Image (cartoon, rainbow, N blue to C red):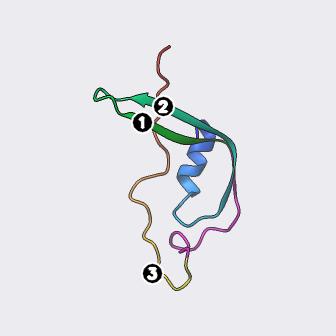
Amino acid sequence: MTFDKLAATCGEYLTKGRKVAVVGKLRLNEWTTKDGERRSRLQAVADAVQFLDKPALGGAAPVDPRAEPAKPADRSAVGAYRRKAS
């Protein structure tokens, strides 16, 4: 997850297959459903993102050079985040 200007930058330049280095922290959320099942979710919260490769012309570079080129994403990489009221 990214926020503010970093989220805007990632939304504009980050595509599937891009190589990036991420500095941040992992956040573990745990909860119990109404049915009594224990659930958890691990999220990476980025403080900094460094792009390690140049963007390919016309979209993302495929991970495997023999693979079919990937189509551009239908939506941006920016996600919505709402902090729960304490």
**Residue 62 in view, yes or no:** yes
Mark 1 sits on what residue?
Answer: 39
Query: Which residue is found at the position 56% from the left and 82% from the top?
Result: 65
What secondary structure is found at the residue carrying circle 2?
Answer: strand
Give how far across and how far down residue 76 sits, in percent.
46, 52
Q: Would you say residue 1 is visible in this rendering?
A: no
Above/below status of 41 relative to 49: above
Mark 3 or 1: in front is 1
Amino acid type assigned to the residue bearing label 1 in the image: Arg
Q: Residue at 47% across / 16% down in the picture?
A: 85
Sequence-earlier tag: 2 or 1: 2
Q: Residues within 10 Å of mark 1 (few under 14, many from 20)?
A: few
| Location of mark 3 (residue) | 68
Magenta highlight range:
48-63
- Most distant residue in the front direction: 36
Looking at the rendered structure, the number of numbered marks drawn on it comes to 3
Disc with the residue nearer the chain's start (2 vs 3): 2
Three-letter amino acid code at the position of disc 3: Glu
Residue that numbered label 2 is attached to: 30
The answer to whether the residue labelled 2 contacts the one labelled 1, judged by CB atoms less than 8 Å apart, is yes
Where does the image place residue 2, in percent across and percent down from the top left?
A: 58, 41
Amino acid type at mark 2 = Glu
